[in-house]
């Protein structure tokens, strides 16, 4: 005859208590093992950083097109095409930087660094840009091979270090808002996470968000001409196709 447990009794019968104890231990073990498996299987975040509390001073040449950029002269002896490091410029929040009035000028500005292995960006502090002198023309871009590259379109600010991970469907809504506000779009090449392409239109101008916003966080293939601008790769898109 099996035991019968009445709820108001001080203790459950031994056989019922033993069964409950085994079930609780088994469930606890399953939870722990599942948690460990999920942690081990989780892909680690890529290394990136946003110096949120540190404001630095930078000096360089402003390039307003296709996207706001600060070209900073590299010290030492380097080849002509490597004389400058190009840092994309963005505004505070989900906005692009307003630098049209300083195009081609050497300026000093204050901002916060955002960076990862393959890209560096500066979040420009409001009203901090001050011209120092008119600059000589920088070296023009080179290249022009027609390519088709498969990958994912992301907003450069979050992906560079403000958010982690700054890509994928979990980040889609944020990316759309940033890109709509003027943050430059970049293409991450599939299976090559450290290879990025700044996206422009076929004429090398800023890409109209209406042509790609519905494809953010989706697998896409971008066809166009590959341009090397100093240490930066630009892809002049002629076609952006969603892959199924």
Image (cartoon, rainbow, N blue to C red):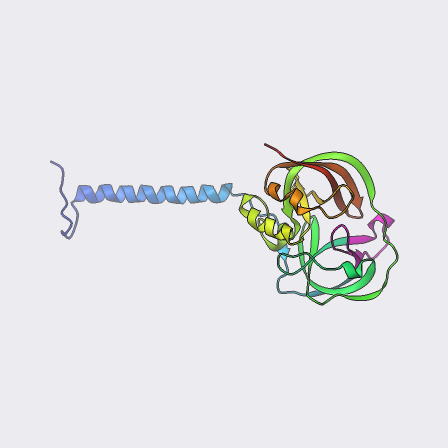
The quadrant in which the N terminus is found is top left
Q: Position of residue 119 (x, y in %)?
A: 70, 50
- 88 vs 169: above or below: below
Identify the image quadrant of residue 23: top left
- Residue lying furthest top: 244
Count of marks placed on residues: 0
Of residues 190 and 5, the one nearer the viewer is 190
Q: Is residue 222 above or below residue 69?
A: above
Query: Which residue in the rendered view is the most extreme toward the front?
Result: 210
Task: Using the rendered view, name the quadrant where residue 58 is placed.
Answer: bottom right
Which residue appears at 63% of the width and 51% of the height?
A: 180
The answer to whether residue 218 is above or below residue 174 is: above
**Percent position of residue 231, x then y:** 78, 48
Res 184 seen here:
yes
In depth, the one of 21 and 78 nearer the eye is: 78
Left or right of 141 on screen, residue 43 = left
Answer left or right for 168 relative to 116.
left
- Looking at this view, name the residue that lies furthest to the right: 136
Q: Is residue 79 visible?
A: no
- In terms of depth relative to the viewer, which is nearer, 157 or 21? 157
Q: Quadrant of the C terminus?
A: top right
Residue in the picture at 70% in, 48% down: 118
The span shown in magenta is 60-85
Kindly indicate the quadrant of the structure image that contains residue 191. top right
Percent coordinates x, y for residue 65 in the rendering: 77, 52
- Residue 154 part of the magenta segment: no
- In x, y percent, where is residue 174? 57, 51
In the rendered structure, the answer to whether residue 232 lies left or right of residue 112 reads: right
Q: Residue at x 69, y 46 (%)?
A: 208
């Amino acid at each position: 005859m099996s035991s019968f447990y009445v709820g108001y009794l001080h203790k459950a019968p031994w056989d019922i208590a033993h069964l409950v104890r085994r079930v609780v231990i088994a469930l606890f073990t399953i939870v722990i093992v599942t948690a460990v498996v999920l942690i081990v299987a989780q892909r680690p975040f890529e290394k990136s950083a946003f110096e949120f509390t540190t404001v630095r001073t930078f000096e360089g040449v402003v390039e307003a097109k296709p996207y706001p950029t600060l070209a900073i002269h590299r010290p030492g002896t380097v080849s002509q095409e490597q004389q400058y490091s190009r840092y994309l410029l963005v505004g505070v929040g989900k906005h692009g930087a307003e630098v049209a009035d300083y195009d081609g000028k050497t300026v000093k500005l204050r901002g916060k660094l955002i960076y990862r292995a393959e890209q560096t960006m500066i979040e420009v502090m409001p009203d901090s840009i001050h011209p120092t002198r008119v600059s000589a023309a920088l070296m023009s871009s080179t290249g022009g091979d027609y390519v088709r590259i498969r990958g994912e379109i992301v907003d450069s600010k979050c992906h560079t270090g403000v958010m982690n991970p700054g890509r994928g469907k979990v980040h889609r809504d944020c990316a759309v808002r940033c890109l709509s506000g003027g943050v430059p779009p970049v293409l991450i090449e599939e299976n090559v996470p450290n290879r990025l392409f700044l996206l422009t239109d076929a004429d090398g101008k800023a890409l109209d968000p209406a042509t790609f916003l519905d494809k953010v966080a989706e697998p896409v293939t971008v066809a166009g001409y590959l341009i090397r601008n100093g240490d930066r790769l630009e892809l002049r898109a002629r076609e952006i196709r969603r892959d199924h």
